[in-house]
């Protein structure tokens, strides 16, 4: 999700450089701040709501992991860009044949 939002932000800046460029400081703050705020809010939601629902009580134990989750999402950005450049060479799909037949009796332990 984080990488997708960052990719969309960069893509919009590259594809539409002259249309509706933020002019004021408030517009620039919203242009970059709103997506970053949304990302951090989502990370906090995952760090608070999920564990709280699992433990059936409110807990803030995983809030310290929010930055790590945010960083993990950011590490996917270079991977997505590399995948986009590698995908151009994958025009022909070759089906993988699965020829080995294995039955349940072959994997059951013999007793």
Image (cartoon, grey):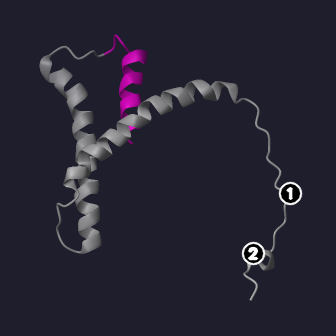
Reply above or below: 95 against 17.
below
Q: Residue furthest bottom?
A: 111
Which mark's residue is nearer the viewer, 2 or 1? 2
Q: Main secondary structure of the magenta part?
A: helix
Circle on res. 74:
none
Q: Which residue is mark 2?
A: 107
Secondary structure under tag 1 reads loop
Reply above or below: 40 against 13.
below
Q: Earlier in the sequence, mark 2 or mark 1?
A: 1
Q: Which residue is mark 1?
A: 99
Q: Quadrant of residue 77?
A: top left
Reply above or below: 110 against 44.
below
Q: Are marks 2 and 1 in contact (CB under 8 Å)?
A: no
Residue 36 shown left or right of residue 80 in the figure: left
Q: Nearer the viewer, residue 94 or 75?
A: 75
| Residue in view at x 24 percent, y 27 percent | 32
| Residue in view at x 29 percent, y 45 percent | 68
Residue 101 place in picture, x, y as percent:
84, 65
Quarter of the image where the C terminus is located: bottom right
Q: Nearer the viewer, residue 23 or 78?
A: 78
Residue 25 place in picture, x, y as percent:
13, 18
Q: Quadrant of residue 52?
A: bottom left
Mark 1 Cα shell of 10 Å, populated few (<14), some (14-19), many (≥20)? few
Whether residue 30 is in magenta: the answer is no
Q: Start and end of the magenta stretch?
A: 1-19
Q: Quadrant of residue 85?
A: top right
| Residue in view at x 39 percent, y 42 percent | 1
Residue 38 place in picture, x, y as percent:
25, 41
Reply above or below: 50 against 6.
below
Residue 3 shown left or right of residue 96 in the figure: left
Residue 24 place in picture, x, y as percent:
15, 16
Residue 108 shown left or right of residue 64 in the figure: right
């Amino acid at each position: 999700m984080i990488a997708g939002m960052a990719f969309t932000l960069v893509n919009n800046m590259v594809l539409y450089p002259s249309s509706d460029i933020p002019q004021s400081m408030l517009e620039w703050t919203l242009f970059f701040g709103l997506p970053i705020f949304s990302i951090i809010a989502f990370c906090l939601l995952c760090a608070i709501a999920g564990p709280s629902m699992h433990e059936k009580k409110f807990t803030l134990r995983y809030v310290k992991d929010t930055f790590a989750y945010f960083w993990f999402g950011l590490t996917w950005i270079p991977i997505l860009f590399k995948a986009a450049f590698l995908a151009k060479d994958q025009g022909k799909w070759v089906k993988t044949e699965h020829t080995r037949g294995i039955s349940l009796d072959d994997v059951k332990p013999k007793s």
